[in-house]
């Protein structure tokens, strides 16, 4: 299987349809993207189950950001994905912390 470049990923997602589905499948099976999610979760002492949740939520947000023009291509797709995962974890951590203070 030939590797997707960032440009390939962006074009496929923006094209929609079968191309977008294939791009999402390729991202899902790319271990580097899963490692970005795992790294983000571990920074906030999350569990292995949290990794999968963050990974899937991160892919969904990445897909939406690219599709809707929110990804400005100032970084690689993988780096942007890592930032999305970090923000997902930070938001969850903040929410949990607030709940424990009540």
Image (cartoon, rainbow, N blue to C red):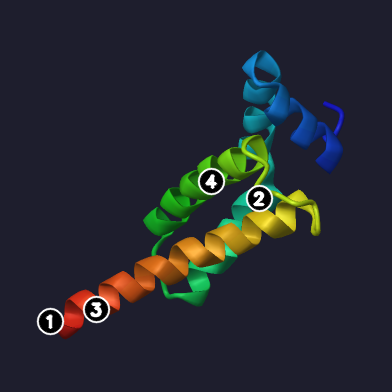
57 sits left or right of 68 in the view: left
SS category of the residue bearing label 1:
loop
Classify residue 86 by image quadrant: bottom right
Closer to the N terminus: mark 1 or mark 2? 2
Q: What residue is pinned by disc 3? A: 98
Depth check, mark 3 against mark 2: the one in front is 3
Where is residue 53? Give x, y as percent.
42, 50
Q: What residue is pinned by disc 4? A: 61
Q: CA distance from mark 1 to mark 3?
A: 7 Å
Contact check, label 1 and label 2, Cβ < 8 Å = no
72 sits left or right of 46 in the view: right
Q: CA distance from mark 2 to mark 4?
A: 13 Å
Q: Is residue 5 visible?
A: no
x 47%, y 47%: residue? 57
Closer to the N terminus: mark 2 or mark 4? 2
x 40%, y 68%: residue? 91
Q: What residue is pinned by disc 2? A: 33
Contact check, label 4 and label 1, Cβ < 8 Å = no
Quadrant showing the N terminus: top right
């Amino acid at each position: 299987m030939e590797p997707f470049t960032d440009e390939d990923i962006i074009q496929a997602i923006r094209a929609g349809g079968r191309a977008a589905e294939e791009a999402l499948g390729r991202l899902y099976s790319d271990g580097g993207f899963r490692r970005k999610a795992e790294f983000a979760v571990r920074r906030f002492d999350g569990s292995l189950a949290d990794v999968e949740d963050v990974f899937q939520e991160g892919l969904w947000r990445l897909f939406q950001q690219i599709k809707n023009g929110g990804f400005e291509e100032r970084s690689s797709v993988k780096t942007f994905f890592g930032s999305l995962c970090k923000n997902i974890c930070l938001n969850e951590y903040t929410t949990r912390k607030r709940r424990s203070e009540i």
